[in-house]
């Protein structure tokens, strides 16, 4: 869009897009399609275009009328130039647009750059490919907060690792480093689909091979270090700051090759926005995954609904939403990282839990005096209440303030306004001063730890960082430089306090303006004498200043310029006034330029303080997260989890565990369940039970409680004792990915393969309904083999949900290690007679009647799934349900007979037969003189449901004829019945042999 007068105009294709997205009118003007918006609505319309996934450039006038009149271009058109570029990942850090109330709030706007190269890793154990076919490098930058994430890892053909990164970071913009493999590009483009409005841009990386990437990165550091401004050079005058700077460079050099390539691409991309300097802050770099944190896979994030629900993709009903009681925007962002990256270090987990416990206990102490009706005289309790009051008060105040984390980063980018700078500095200063009232720093100096108000080591460290005397001193010093009233009004000319000689250029420009005003005001004396009017004064009308108003009959010199008039008066501008006004206007423009340059230099000088302020804000965010977890534990009656030592066996013991999300919905109606897994006892549970009985809810709640415990939160249970887990892996639900060419069964087995490659003996694996995407035979066989492999080799904590009773036989191979349990229920059974309209047969069937789910996990195995009950709930047609009941009764009859159990199982497992077997069956009957006169053909089409139905009919008729032969007193009839039964038996046996 181009600034033209008081409007911004779009032309050509841009006008067409703007008209569609913004709902404005586009018309043809001089053979060009054009549309326009008013200048004061720039912020709103740019945000709407950027939210739709577009890259927006704004072209503004680069000179004012006063400067143009005194420049070389005074006869030409106004000069214009590209003043700003905006995208979803950069808009919050951009000048003029970002940082307002219309911002993205607690959501992150990461720019994700992805590069890769092909690899082939051999598996030493079996001599075949391990499944890794690419090595991926990435850089993710949250430009508005200064968070820089890097990583490099091997990934399989399904790109499970990359998918986990994408779902965890939720990037707003993706930068593809060409070339990429088809599978990687498919995944990224599928994420950035039309509904997401995620912007995708490509960048070639040919020039970054063979050391070119590292050279690009180092050149940025060299330019930054050799900055042109003296303020920025002061950053490295201190030896400590120089050490930090070189540590950042060493960290960049030590990064893997592909991560450096992604970093170089990101730097080149951000240069067009002028935001590349954020990548010079080596201290803000962090790896995507570390040994101290558990990285949840994409499956776990989706299937456990950690960040979003699976219903509409919103945050409502997710684990994050149920745990999020933060009061600040930046605290909410940090809590999201905590939830997606639970800790794997016992000491760090215990430090968080101790901090949360201390805050929660203080909350309880503060509520107790009210219930007793009198104040506490105990000084310790008063100090505790004061501490929690200060913490809640500071966080509440910060929640009402602007996003200070984005604010200090916008100051670093030199895009912050004066009012934004003042509000951010005041917020940090006030928070630090309030925390200093706890006197933690003085206690540490005096060594009085026994009387301290705050006992938690983590809590003390965070409070000390947030109330650092250095940060407070710097904030006070910076604020003293500025005029707060001028900052609130946006008055840049009067913003700086120049009395201490800090801004000489601004002082000179202000003096020049003052002198120009004085010279202009002195002219009135000249005109009083010239016209003989001692009361003559300058006046202003409709924006025109320094006018001389005279009666219409007064004669004036011919070189006076008439400006406007009324019936009785005429207003003039004498030539000396016009000259003085011109000089005043030029002086004001020069002052404005000087003030903008001084403001830019002032913000540049802030960079040397940026790491300290960033650390203080991160400490405030961590305090907000701990306070949120304490509120969660207090409001929902959660318990503090206990972690066993690292040298003890892996174990999970939850007494009366509850699902943290469903409990909030069902309240007291939720049924809790116990979990008892131990590496030296039973570490695998096979869970069976009816459909909709609560099996999936049970295994999900175990995983979610474990995640909450390792985040450092209290958990929904009566007691919780567990070993620190290094990973939680899931395989749940049925879904396909048509865009990426994945079938439902391929998705299932790919997830199982990912679990095999990544889980260890310290992992929790939950698998739900494995084997549903293929035939019954293959499904049972694969599910059985996978469970057997996990139990025998991985020996991890396993919860395995299945409707296949055969899977439970695994416990016979691992007595004591594998147990079975089921979800309890009650039924009111009754025997009903169902007529098969096709065969006119009556079948007796046990109708379960009303099924009452108890949702309680009890030992044992359930052989009923009550699928027909679910069919009734789904309101399938009665005829369809009756037909299904007939088939179920016949199949149960087949399986329940001793003679047909083996063959019935084979048919139920989905064994199929080819046509060449039919000839062998025919020969078998011929050699045994078996007649098919009764119509029981061994080579009948017995595939699928037709085959099962026909075999059931064979069994049914066989037993009828056999019963008739034994009961019939007429020998001739009995002989014929026995003959028919013999023929049927040979048919059944022949089918069994051939299978």
Image: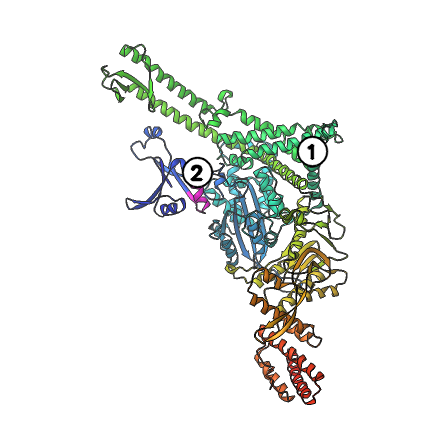
Q: Is residue 298 visible?
A: yes
Q: Is residue 45 magenta?
A: yes
Q: Quadrant of residue 280?
A: top right
The stretch in magenta equals: 44-56
Secondary-structure class at tag 1: helix
Residue at the image position 54 percent from the left and 61 percent from the top: 742
| Residue 501: x %, y % from top left | 50, 21
| Residue 214: x %, y % from top left | 53, 46
Residue at the image position 62 percent from the left and 28 percent from the top: 433
Front label number (2 vs 1): 1
In this orientation, which residue lies closer to the viewer: 356 or 296?
Answer: 356
Q: Is residue 85 visible?
A: no
In the picture shown, does residue 693 fall above or below 290? below
CA separation in Å, label 2 and label 1: 46 Å
In this orientation, which residue lies closer to the viewer: 922 or 16?
Answer: 922
| Residue 21: x %, y % from top left | 41, 46
In the picture shown, does residue 845 fall above or below 79? below
Q: Which quadrant does the C terminus fall into?
A: bottom right
Residue ID for mark 1 = 367
| Residue 500: x %, y % from top left | 51, 21
Secondary-structure class at tag 2: helix
Asked which colour scheme the image uses, the reply is rainbow
| Mark with earlier residue (2, 1) | 2
Residue ID for mark 2 = 43
Q: Is residue 745 magenta?
A: no
């Amino acid at each position: 869009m181009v600034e033209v007068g008081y409007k911004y105009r779009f032309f050509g294709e841009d006008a067409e897009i703007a008209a569609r997205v913004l709902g404005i009118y586009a018309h043809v003007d001089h053979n060009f399609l054009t549309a326009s918006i008013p200048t004061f609505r720039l912020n709103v319309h740019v945000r709407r275009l950027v939210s739709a996934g577009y890259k927006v450039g704004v072209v503004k006038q680069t000179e004012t009328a006063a400067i143009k009149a005194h420049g070389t271009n005074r006869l030409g058109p106004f000069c214009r130039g590209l003043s700003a570029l905006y995208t979803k990942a950069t808009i919050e850090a951009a000048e003029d647009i970002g940082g307002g109330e219309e911002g993205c709030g607690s959501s992150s706007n990461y720019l994700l750059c992805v590069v890769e190269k092909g690899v082939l890793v051999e598996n030493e154990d079996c001599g075949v490919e391990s499944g890794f076919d690419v090595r991926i490098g990435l850089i993710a930058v949250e430009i508005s907060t200064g968070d820089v994430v890097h990583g490099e890892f091997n990934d399989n053909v399904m790109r499970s690792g990359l998918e986990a990164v994408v779902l965890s970071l939720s990037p707003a913009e993706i930068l593809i480093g060409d070339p990429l493999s088809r599978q990687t590009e498919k995944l990224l483009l599928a994420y950035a689909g039309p509904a997401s409005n995620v912007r995708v841009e490509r960048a070639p990386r040919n020039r970054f091979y063979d050391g070119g990437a590292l050279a690009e990165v180092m050149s940025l550091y060299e330019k930054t270090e050799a900055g042109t401004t003296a303020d920025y050079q002061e950053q490295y005058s201190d030896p400590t700051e120089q050490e930090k700077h070189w540590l950042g460079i060493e960290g960049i050099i030590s990064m893997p090759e592909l991560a450096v390539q992604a970093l170089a691409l990101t730097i080149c991309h951000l240069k067009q926005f002028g935001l590349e300097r954020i990548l010079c802050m080596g201290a803000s770099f962090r790896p995507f995954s570390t040994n101290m944190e558990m990285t949840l896979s994409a499956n776990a994030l989706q299937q456990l609904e950690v960040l979003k629900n699976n219903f509409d993709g919103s945050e409502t009903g997710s684990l994050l939403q149920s745990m999020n009681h933060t009061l600040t925007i930046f605290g909410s962002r940090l809590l999201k990282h905590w939830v997606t990256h639970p800790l794997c270090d016992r000491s760090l987990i215990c430090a968080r839990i101790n901090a949360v416990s201390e805050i929660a206990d203080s909350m309880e102490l503060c509520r107790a005096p009210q219930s007793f009706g009198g104040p506490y005289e105990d000084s310790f309790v008063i100090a505790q209440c004061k501490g929690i009051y200060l913490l809640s008060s500071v966080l509440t105040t910060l929640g009402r303030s602007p996003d200070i984390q984005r604010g200090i980063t916008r100051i670093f980018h030199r895009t912050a306004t004066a009012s934004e700078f003042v509000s951010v500095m005041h917020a940090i200063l006030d928070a630090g001063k309030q925390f200093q009232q706890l006197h933690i720093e003085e206690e540490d100096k005096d060594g009085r730890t026994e009387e301290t108000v705050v006992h938690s080591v983590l809590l003390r460290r965070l409070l000390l960082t947030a109330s650092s005397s250095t940060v407070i001193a710097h904030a006070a010093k910076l604020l003293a430089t500025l005029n707060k009233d001028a900052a609130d009004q946006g008055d840049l000319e009067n913003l700086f306090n120049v009395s201490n000689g800090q801004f000489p250029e601004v002082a000179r420009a202000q003096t020049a303006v003052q002198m120009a005003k004085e010279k202009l005001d002195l002219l009135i004396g000249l005109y009083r004498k010239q016209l003989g009017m001692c009361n003559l004064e300058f006046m202003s009308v409709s924006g025109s200043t320094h006018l001389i108003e005279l009666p219409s009959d007064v004669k004036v010199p011919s070189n006076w310029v008439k400006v406007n008039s009324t019936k009785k008066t005429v207003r003039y501008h004498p030539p000396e006034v016009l000259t003085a006004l011109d000089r005043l206007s030029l002086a004001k423009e020069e002052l404005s330029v000087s003030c903008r340059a001084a403001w830019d230099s002032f913000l540049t000088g802030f960079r040397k303080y940026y790491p300290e302020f960033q650390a203080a804000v991160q400490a405030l965010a961590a305090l907000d997260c701990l306070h949120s977890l304490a509120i969660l534990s207090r409001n929902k009656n959660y318990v503090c989890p206990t972690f066993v030592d690292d040298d003890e066996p892996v174990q999970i013991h939850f007494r009366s565990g509850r699902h943290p999300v469903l409990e909030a919905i069902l309240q007291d109606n939720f049924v809790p369940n116990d979990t008892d897994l131990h590496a030296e006892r039973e570490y695998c549970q096979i869970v069976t039970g009816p459909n909709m009985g609560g099996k999936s809810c049970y295994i999900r709640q175990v995983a979610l409680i474990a995640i909450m415990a390792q985040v450092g939160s209290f958990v929904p249970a009566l007691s919780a004792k567990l070993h620190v887990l290094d990973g939680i892996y899931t395989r749940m639900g049925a879904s396909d990915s048509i865009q990426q060419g994945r079938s439902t069964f391929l998705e299932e087995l790919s997830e199982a393969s990912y679990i095999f490659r990544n889980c260890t003996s310290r992992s929790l694996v939950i698998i739900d309904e494995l084997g549903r995407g293929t035939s019954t035979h293959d499904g049972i066989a694969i599910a059985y083999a996978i469970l057997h492999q996990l139990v025998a080799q991985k020996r991890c904590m396993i919860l395995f949900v299945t409707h296949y009773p055969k899977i439970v036989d695994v416990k016979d191979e691992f007595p004591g290690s594998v147990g079975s349990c089921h979800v309890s229920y009650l039924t009111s059974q009754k025997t009903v007679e169902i007529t098969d309209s096709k065969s006119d047969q009556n079948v007796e069937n046990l109708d379960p009647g009303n099924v009452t789910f108890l949702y309680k996990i009890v030992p044992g195995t359930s052989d009923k799934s009550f699928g027909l009950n679910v069919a009734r709930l789904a309101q399938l047609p009665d005829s369809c349900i009756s037909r299904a009941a007939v088939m179920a009764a016949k199949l149960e009859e087949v399986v329940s007979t001793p003679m047909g159990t083996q063959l019935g199982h084979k048919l139920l497992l989905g064994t199929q037969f080819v046509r060449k077997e039919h000839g062998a069956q025919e020969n078998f009957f011929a050699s045994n003189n078996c007649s098919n006169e009764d119509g029981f053909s061994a080579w009948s089409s017995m595939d699928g449901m037709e085959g099962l139905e026909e075999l059931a009919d064979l069994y049914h008729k066989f037993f009828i004829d056999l019963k008739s032969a034994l009961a019939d007193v007429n020998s001739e009839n009995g002989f014929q019945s026995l003959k028919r039964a013999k023929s049927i038996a040979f048919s059944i046996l022949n089918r069994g042999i051939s299978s």
